[in-house]
Amino acid sequence: MYAKLIWRNARRSFGDYLIYIVTLTLCVAMFYAFLSIASDYYQPDIGAEFDLSLLGSNTKRAVLGITLLLLFLIKYVNNFMLLRRQREFAVQTVMGMEQKTTALLFFAETLIMGAAALVIGIFAGVLLAQIITAMQLKSLGYPYQVTWTLYPDTCLLTILFFLASFTVIGLMNVRTIRKIKVIDMLQAQRQGESAKKSRWMPAVLLLFAGSLIMMLLTGISKMHFYFDARFPFPAHLVFYANIILPALGLFMAAVFGAARLSGRKWPMNRLAAGELAIDFFLLFFSACVPVIRQKYMISMGAGTINAYAMFLLMETAYAVCAFIYLIGDGITLLKERSLRTRYHEENLFLFGQLQFRLKTTAKTMTLICLTLMVSIGLFLSIPALTGWATGYLEERSVFGVRIASTYNKAYTTEELPGTDENYAFVTDFLEKEGIGTADDCAFSLCLLQKEQFHNRIKTEFPVLAVSLTDYNHLRRMQNLSPITLEEGTFTTQWRSAALEDDIEAFLQSHAVIETDAGQLRLSRESAHHAPMSEYIYNLYTDVVYVVPDDICAFLMPVERHRYINTTKPMPYQTAVNLEALFTRTLPTDLEKDGAGYLIRTASVEISDTRSGIFILKTSMTYAAVMLFISCFTILALQQLMDASNYRSRFGTLRNMGVEDTRIKRLIRKQLAFWFALPVLTALAGAAIFIIYFFRIISIEITAYVGPRTLFIQITAITAILLFLLLCYYATTRILFQKIVFERK
């Protein structure tokens, strides 16, 4: 009998469980898909140059850690279902059924629905796993072929995780139901009708005042260190604004606090609105900091830029909180000032619904907005970060093996340690492993003048020079044509991330250079951008001089490099063994030995870096989508709760003669407002911070990603967000209308 009752209740309540099933299905599918690449059975054909052990173990940790968010989401959805069914539970208890039995029946229902979502989600995860695999193989440069595989270990882990979650939360629900009194069950759905306004804004204003103090102190500090009277007016305005505006905000808060302490009943929304106005100006001037820094070449360090990024984040968070808090007042103002808007069709009813719920859900709506803002920010930053890392990898791993020697003592060419004979064991190792050497270039990087050896200050770090013959050899190793130099001239080699303005300014100020072997003037072909390992550039410069061989012979060498291209790709494990052999053979303590040595192989660097990039990309994507799902689920459940609580209000409209089509249109407007409000607010907040972030790394985006690629990826991400939003909106609308129009 109980089994039949459970099955009957599950079938009748399927509509109520639809959001629950949709949410769990999406979560299970994503969990399985992202975890599938960590499976022991996951063995894509990628050759011996890559090692997936790092990828699998770290991906599993990241996915399992992020998935803990699901426990909160499952608990929230279960609480909604519990509230929806409490009247039914009360009736069953009154009829003689024990509350323990009622609780166990509800637990069985949720377990059935969870099991259904688990099965559907696993099969959907198999499909989604193909997309994840395609992304991974593309990042490694391999073609993709569809392989429909159900990984047993991933499948088992998915089932165990979600069944354990269902069981733990289900038992918590059993305990909750057993403690609720019958009279409380009967009145449960009336609890949402309280119009008590959330009192969380004072805490937000207090935190914002603390951030204003930090901004004021930072503004004064940066004014002291970086301000110069020769700066143009826009730079002056940014410096002064980041001092005056925080001071004005603190003064306003102090006046308001003193008035409240003296007994004056000033409403909190006035202070919130005033601080919001100041906050908008702060957002603008904080966002201008990287622009002013780049335009007027102000030498602000990374710490300053990061500090203003933190302030921008705090200012955006306050703007979101204050906007949600004040939007109810805005609706009231709109309704009072426009009679046509107020009394047009059912607008009076709609305004009443929105105002009532804004009083009680402002805090929850604000948290949803902030969470969506974080998830959108994660999503939009993925293409920039991964593109930057990938482009940088392609530049620094152009040679198969790279060996570098750095000297901490002034050696002559004859005394130079780490000459080619010291690296003979590397060639012997490659030949022993059956990996031939296609090309090999050993070269020195030299100082133009010996006295520059002790220039270790960042702003005076000397630019190194390489001979023309060695530079052309490196170009030939990359199938590039050689360059020529006229007598008495030099040219330059630049990182791909160097800005054209910086290059032009450098060349204008270094059109003539002094060396220990004489003076050189700049060649007509003054700048080259061949892809070279980053090790040819020193710590603080993006350029290397290319000088004639006869000049370079008289210069003091400070680094010795050897670059090797192999005849075939080196297997990953072979590359690991070579690096271990190199570390055992040569010293690496620069201070103790006077010379430090390092080796980098393309196989290890590409495999480890691409694995790290993929882990970062999948983790951020998984976290962002999980946050999207959580926010949209909570939004949907809030609206369905309103449908249950206020069904009588919609019934009154119908009794007054309002047609069902107009009520449905009213429902569409109400749902559109509640879904659009947090999404659009979060998009605006995320856009502010992302634009600031993109401005900071604009050089890297231009060099390694490209604006067109970034635009395509951001468009795809926006499409995913809209798809999830439409899915939840459509599902919520169907269930909302079902609740409102049932039992006519």
Image (cartoon, rainbow, N blue to C red):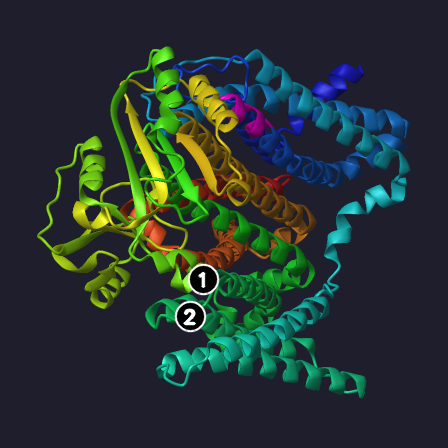
Left or right: residue 589 compared with residue 488: right
Q: Name the residue under label 1.
A: 457
Residue 177 on image: x %, y %: 84, 35
Q: How many marks?
A: 2
Q: Which of 246 and 331 is in front in this view?
A: 246
343 up-or-down from 27: above or below: below
Task: Tell me the mark number nearer the camera, choosing from 1 and 2.
Answer: 1
Q: What stretch is highlighted in magenta?
A: 52-60
Residue 437 on image: x %, y %: 28, 20
Which quarter of the rendering shows the N terminus?
A: top right
Amino acid type, callout 1: Ile
Left or right: residue 515 compared with residue 78: left
Mark found first going from the N terminus, 1 or 2: 2
Left or right: residue 701 compared with residue 525: right
Q: Distance between the residues labelled 1 and 2?
A: 29 Å
Residue 357 is covered by the magenta coloring: no
Q: Name the residue under label 2.
A: 288
Q: Which residue lies furthest to the left in this view?
A: 486
341 up-or-down from 363: above or below: below
Q: Nearer the viewer, residue 24 or 102?
A: 24
